[in-house]
Image (spheres, helix red, strand yellow):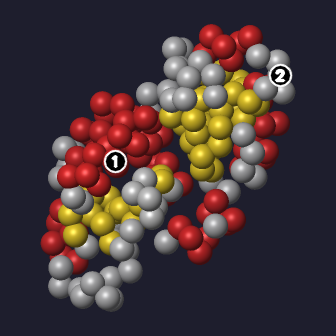
Amino acid sequence: MRPLTDDETKVLFEKLAKYIARNIIHLIDRPDEPYCFRLQKDRVYYVSESNMRRATAIGRKNLVSLGICFGKFTKTGKFRLHITALQYLAQYAKYKVWIKPNGEMPFLYGNHVVKAHIGRVTEDIPEHQGVVIYNMADVPLGFGVSARSTVDMRKVDPTGIAVFHQADNGEYLREEDALF
């Protein structure tokens, strides 16, 4: 595992800022112990510094993963968040969308969220901003990108797309091989 370069860190933080805005600081400067981001092959892991130091005793070829996989860098240099980062995105999310029970299964099968499935949303969501999707019992189901602002969501017809799907908990089953 190696530290991220300045360019990689910039790309990662820009992606995270779409979902958690200035709360990125809470990921790094935690009260319990400091955490950091490390790169193993093309995957970015979020790991405590104490565990990272312990892992230096393991050879790079033998180390499969360490910490929580936040996502991976594509061949074009872009960063793609994985569903494994949902725990932290949900904890620090700025914009949230709650979906009704009849909309949970379509979302968990990888479909976009339509307006008819929305139970409630946080105010002032801008267009093309990262949102975390919850069910009505406040359980995080996944995340996506808002297709419209909050004001425009109210005007669209019930079958119009409100949130573009990015990742959901169903990926643990659908893409089991690609996540880790």
Q: Residue at x 76, y 16 (%)?
A: 156
Q: Amino acid at mark 1?
A: Val
Q: Residue at x 21, y 58 (%)?
A: 5
Q: Which percent across, then down, holds residue 41?
A: 36, 74
Question: Viewed as shown, does residue 156 lie left or right of 131?
Answer: right
The numbered mark at residue 158 is: 2
Real-space Cα separation, disc 2 to disc 1, in angstroms: 35 Å
Q: Amino acid at mark 2?
A: Pro
For label 2, the SS is loop
Write down the residue under mark 1.
Answer: 11
Q: Residue at x 62, y 63 (%)?
A: 172
In the picture, residue 64 is in which quadrant?
bottom left
Q: Is residue 99 above or below residue 104?
A: above
Q: In this rendering, which labeled residue sits more in front, label 2 or label 1?
A: 1
Classed neighbour count for the residue bearing mark 1: other residues with Cα under 10 Å, few (<14), some (14–19), many (≥20):
some
Question: Viewed as shown, does residue 131 lie left or right of 41?
Answer: right
Q: Which percent across, then down, holds residue 140?
A: 57, 42
Task: Report how many numbered discs are placed on residues in the image.
Answer: 2
Is residue 98 visible in the rendered image? The answer is no
Of all residues, the one furthest to the front in this rendering is 76
Viewer-proximal residue among 7 and 94: 7
The numbered mark at residue 126 is: none
Q: Residue at x 47, y 40 (%)?
A: 90
Classed neighbour count for the residue bearing mark 2: other residues with Cα under 10 Å, few (<14), some (14–19), many (≥20):
some
For label 1, the SS is helix
Q: Is residue 19 above or below residue 59?
A: above
